Amino acid sequence: MNIDWTKFEQVAIGAIGFTTFLVVAFSFGVRLLTNAQNLTPAAKKGDVKAARSELLNRIAAYALFAVSAVVLAYAVFVMFETMYTKK
């Protein structure tokens, strides 16, 4: 059995990079969604600044969740493309 160490290194770096980016993006999304949920009572009482902050936090959180989903879908696509392409 012969291992191509350069390809192994590329796969390891790619896997760690994708995983790190995915975890960071999703974690920031959860944090921003929590911030929005904490601002909801003040926004319901009529605080305009809290309502604006809540909206921006929710938009950013959902955007980060979407980015996480796209990155995950791309990683799965690359994995399956690599596994099932004939060489």
Image: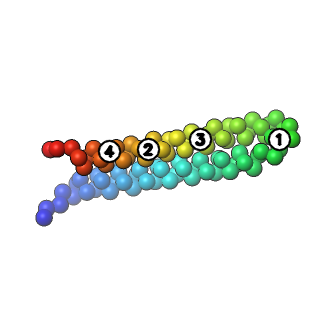
- Label annotation for residue 78: 4
Could you tell me if the residues under marks 3 and 1 are in contact, i.e. CB atoms within 8 Å? no
Position in image of residue 65 (x %, y %): 55, 44
Q: Earlier in the sequence, mark 2 or mark 4?
A: 2
Could you tell me if the residues under marks 2 and 4 are in contact, i.e. CB atoms within 8 Å? no
Q: Earlier in the sequence, mark 2 or mark 1?
A: 1
- Label annotation for residue 62: 3
Q: In 3D space, how far apart are the residues under numbered discs 1 and 4 (Cα atoms)?
A: 45 Å
Position in image of residue 43 (x %, y %): 81, 40
Q: Is residue 64 left or right of residue 49?
A: left
The residue positioned 84% from the left and 38% from the top of the image is 47
Residue at image mark 1 = 44
Position in image of residue 80 (x %, y %): 30, 47
For the residue carrying disc 2, how many other residues have a C-alpha within 10 Å: few (<14), some (14-19), or many (20+)?
some
Q: In 3D space, how far apart are the residues under numbered discs 2 and 4 (Cα atoms)?
A: 10 Å
Q: In 3D space, how far apart are the residues under numbered discs 4 and 3 (Cα atoms)?
A: 24 Å
Residue at image mark 2 = 71
Badge 1 element: helix
Give the residue furthest to the bottom.
1
Q: In 3D space, how far apart are the residues under numbered discs 2 and 1 (Cα atoms)?
A: 35 Å
Badge 2 element: helix
Give the position of the C terminus as an image quadrant: top left
Question: So how many labels did they put on this image?
Answer: 4
For the residue carrying disc 1, how many other residues have a C-alpha within 10 Å: few (<14), some (14-19), or many (20+)?
few
